Image (cartoon, rainbow, N blue to C red):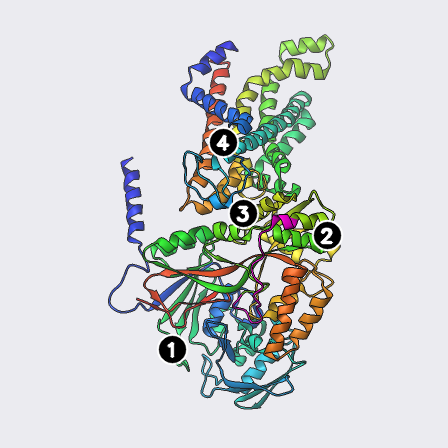
């Protein structure tokens, strides 16, 4: 017994001391910041990744010609200025002078050309190929001028060029390693403020300040990415001071962390939304009145205020306010009487039975489905819940024809990594024969026309009007989903960490971060 | 037999366990009457409430009364355990009797099959079955039943083997009794005592496995309350609202421990050598 007590006392002492990154605080800022990632990066090749954990590291190492600032406005990066010809398809980028890649190779127009050749190569078929579908050709006019011609006037060209996958990699290194580029510390090279020095798979990635960086240099010498997959363990690591910053915080812990001394929680309005979508090919969801009824039957305010208040804001449209093209259509009111009337008009005065598919992968995924089912019950709809693990869930969203898809209502997170209406609406709701991106087989002829016109519209005013119309259709008139809430991107850091930059895209970077 | 129960009555841990089991069985049967609230009633505005007079164990994410859910969960968990144990016992005992009676190749085949089942880690086997049959109460029952078959088969075979050669069995064979009659009337009753003891212990582990499956999301589906599922959902809130996970956790521990102690007590009490 005595020995056991002794062991416990030692453990408590260790916890109390916090032993690790947080405790040693001699004069001056520390030279290392440790970020607990939820997973290791899969690759550091910006052209071939779609996961945030990789993108977060990529954003530190590489840069785009133009980028997003914190409010998602487009700002110059590797290009100091750019313009578009009156034809709407010819874009000219004037590059900054004197920039070098991490290995000293100069950055120039030819490097840009070779990058787009790489990401658009149909044989290499990198994961981000589809994003650059609209580009016809890329030419190096002279050493510091690049001309990109699109196949048609493309309204979302700038946000697409600001997307992390348009980042310029060192073409010499990329061509040397081909498909293996980005898969190791020796095969990743960009122009960014940090360079990679080591990568121990599933243990840590170490970035070091690029002292030859062309703009404001990093404040902290080393940034360490340490994968801690279990969310509760990440929270504990932060509380113990073993790591300096965490993201992907369990929703239940957010409120508690906010109250904790020594920890700062930041919440950033993001491009993310939480929805439940309809499979519109399944009866009775082929009837617009049924979908409208369900939309009115959900008490979103109660859900946002009580269940997810720590990371959600009510939806006010089919996009989030930070996105280009967003239109404020207001919150959809909770109106069970209207829901019952609509159900009656649709021929279901006594409701019907249905199934809701959900996955705990989304924060509160199971509880949201339960709340939805409880609200639906009040208007006579009996919904059974299927909790499905992520791996199985994605097989329902993998380009199935409708007759092979049993799902009726299913949980879905939505957003657009370009923070633009085109990517936020077009792939998700435009008519398509299978559900590769349009998981619910949504189809509305007017929506298709409007979204197609908006895509080719470069006049900001007209574009905005078209997207407003598109959102009226899909959000109100012919609902493609129940929009539950817009998500806030939550990052928690030790109070002695400054200058962490969470992005509305749901990623966090440390270009100017310091640890005191 | 009455001597056995007298012996059991003096076994303090077993009697305490019996009281706990009786309480939970009572709760399971009377859940609808005893529960202070509707265990499925969602009231988002009063979620995460701490324990109070109205909500003895507080409320969960959706404002449902944890105590009422625990009571209804007792019914779900105990029903699964009981049905699964009985099914496992039925199949296991049949196989055991058959093996002991026919001996030779049949015995070899059955016992090797049982050994194959035993060679799988229990939980892995249960997960595999649940994965094949899909989620839900009935597949949980099948999964838990399959895992309990081997122990019953071995137990019955061992007990039966010792009596199939006994004089009274030979006598009834000579009198022309059918195999079925002999097995059911003469051999099986010799196995009752160990079966009762093992059955009680298995009930406890069945609850544990069913909870484990639900904890992993393979068992009982929401919104139905089940202890393992409640524990799984409540665990996220362990730091801020611990009752949601602690209550079902304590319930599982208590019931499993009680069944185990009771089973042990029965084993000792029914031991003919005592």
Residue depicted at x 46% and y 25%: B20
Q: In this rendering, is residue B245 above or below A487?
A: above
- Chain letter of disc 1 in the image: A
Same subunit, tags 4 and 1: no
Q: Which mark is residue A282?
A: 2
Q: x, y (%) of residue A421?
A: 60, 70
Q: Which mark is residue A217?
A: 1
Name which of mark 1 and mark 3 comes first in the sequence. 1
Distance in Å between CA atoms under marks 4 and 2: 40 Å
Same subunit, tags 4 and 3: no
Name the residue that disc number 3 marks: A367
Highlighted magenta segment, given as a residue range: A321-339
Give the foreground label among 4 and 2: 4
- In the image, residue B129 lies in the stretch drawn in magenta: no
Name which of mark 1 and mark 2 comes first in the sequence. 1
On the question of residue A130 being in view, the answer is: no
Q: Secondary structure at mark 4?
A: loop
């Amino acid at each position: 017994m005595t020995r056991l007590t002794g062991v416990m006392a030692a453990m408590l002492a260790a916890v109390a001391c916090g032993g690790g990154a947080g405790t040693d605080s001699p004069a001056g800022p520390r030279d290392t910041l440790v970020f607990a990632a939820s997973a290791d990066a899969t690759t550091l090749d910006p052209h071939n990744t779609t996961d945030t954990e990789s993108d977060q590291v990529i954003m530190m190492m590489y840069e785009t010609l133009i980028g997003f600032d914190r409010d998602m406005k487009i700002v110059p990066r590797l290009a100091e200025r750019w313009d578009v010809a009156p034809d709407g398809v010819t874009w000219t980028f004037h590059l900054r002078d004197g920039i070098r890649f991490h290995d000293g190779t100069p950055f120039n127009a030819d490097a840009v050309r070779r990058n787009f050749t790489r990401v658009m190569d149909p044989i290499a078929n990198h994961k981000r190929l589809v994003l650059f579908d609209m580009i016809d050709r890329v030419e190096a006019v002279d050493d510091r001028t690049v001309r990109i011609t699109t196949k048609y006037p493309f309204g979302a060209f700038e946000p697409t060029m600001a997307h992390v996958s348009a980042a310029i990699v060192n073409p010499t290194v990329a061509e040397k390693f081909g498909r293996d580029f980005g898969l190791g510390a020796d095969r990743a090279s960009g122009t960014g403020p940090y360079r990679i020095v080591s990568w121990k798979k599933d243990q840590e990635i170490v970035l070091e300040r690029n002292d030859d960086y062309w703009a404001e240099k990093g404040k902290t010498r080393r940034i360490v990415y340490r994968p801690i997959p279990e969310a509760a363990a990440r929270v504990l690591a932060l509380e113990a001071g073993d790591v300096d910053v965490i993201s992907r915080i369990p929703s239940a812990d957010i409120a508690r962390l906010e109250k904790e001394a020594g920890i700062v929680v930041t919440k950033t309005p993001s491009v993310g939304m939480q929805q439940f979508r309809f499979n519109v090919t399944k009866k009775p969801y082929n009837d617009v009145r049924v979908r409208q009824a369900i939309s009115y039957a959900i008490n979103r305010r109660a859900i946002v205020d009580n269940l997810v208040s720590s990371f959600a804001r009510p939806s006010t449209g089919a996009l989030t306010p930070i996105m280009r093209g967003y239109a404020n259509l207001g919150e959809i009111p909770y109106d069970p009487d209207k829901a019952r009337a609509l159900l009656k008009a649709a021929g279901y005065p006594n409701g019907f039975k249905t199934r809701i598919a959900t996955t705990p992968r989304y924060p509160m995924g199971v509880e949201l489905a339960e709340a939805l089912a409880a609200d639906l019950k009040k208007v006579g709809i009996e919904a059974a819940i299927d909790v499905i693990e992520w791996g199985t869930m994605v097989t329902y969203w993998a380009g199935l024809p409708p007759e092979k898809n049993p799902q009726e209502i299913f949980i879905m997170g939505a957003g657009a990594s370009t923070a633009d209406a085109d990517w936020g609406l077009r792939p998700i709701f435009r008519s398509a024969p299978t559900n590769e991106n349009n998981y619910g087989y949504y189809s509305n002829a007017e929506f298709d026309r409007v979204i197609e016109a908006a895509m080719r519209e470069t006049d900001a005013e007209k574009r905005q009007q078209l997207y407003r119309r598109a959102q009226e259709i899909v959000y109100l008139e012919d609902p493609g989903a129940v929009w539950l809430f817009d998500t806030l991107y939550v990052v928690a850091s030790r109070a002695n960490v400054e200058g962490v930059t969470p992005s509305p895209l749901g990623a966090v970077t440390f270009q100017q971060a310091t640890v005191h | 037999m009455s001597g056995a129960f007298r012996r059991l009555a003096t076994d303090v841990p077993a009697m305490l366990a019996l009281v706990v089991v009786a309480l939970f069985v009572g709760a399971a049967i009377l859940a609808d009457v005893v529960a202070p609230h509707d265990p499925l009633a969602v009231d988002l505005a009063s979620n995460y409430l701490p324990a109070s007079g109205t909500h003895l164990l507080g409320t969960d994410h959706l404002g449902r009364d944890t105590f009422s859910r625990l009571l209804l969960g007792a019914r779900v968990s105990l029903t699964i355990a009981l049905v699964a144990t009985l099914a496992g016992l039925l199949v296991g005992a049949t196989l055991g009797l058959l093996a002991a009676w026919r001996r030779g190749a049949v015995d070899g085949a059955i016992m090797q099959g049982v050994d194959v089942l035993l060679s799988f880690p229990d939980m892995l086997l249960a997960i595999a079955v649940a994965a094949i049959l899909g989620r839900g109460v009935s597949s949980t029952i099948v999964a838990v039943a399959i895992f309990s078959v081997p122990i019953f088969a071995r137990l019955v075979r061992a007990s039966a083997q010792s009596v199939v050669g006994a004089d009274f069995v030979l006598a009834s064979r000579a009198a022309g009794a059918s195999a079925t009659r002999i097995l059911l009337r003469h051999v099986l009753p010799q196995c009752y005592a160990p079966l009762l003891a093992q059955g009680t212990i298995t009930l406890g582990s069945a609850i544990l496995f069913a909870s484990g499956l639900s904890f992993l999301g393979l068992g009982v589906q929401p919104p139905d309350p089940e202890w393992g599922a409640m524990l799984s959902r409540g665990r996220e809130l362990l730091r801020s609202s611990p009752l949601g996970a602690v209550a079902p956790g304590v319930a599982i521990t208590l019931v499993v421990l009680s069944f185990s102690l009771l089973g042990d007590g029965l084993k000792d009490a029914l031991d003919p050598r005592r």
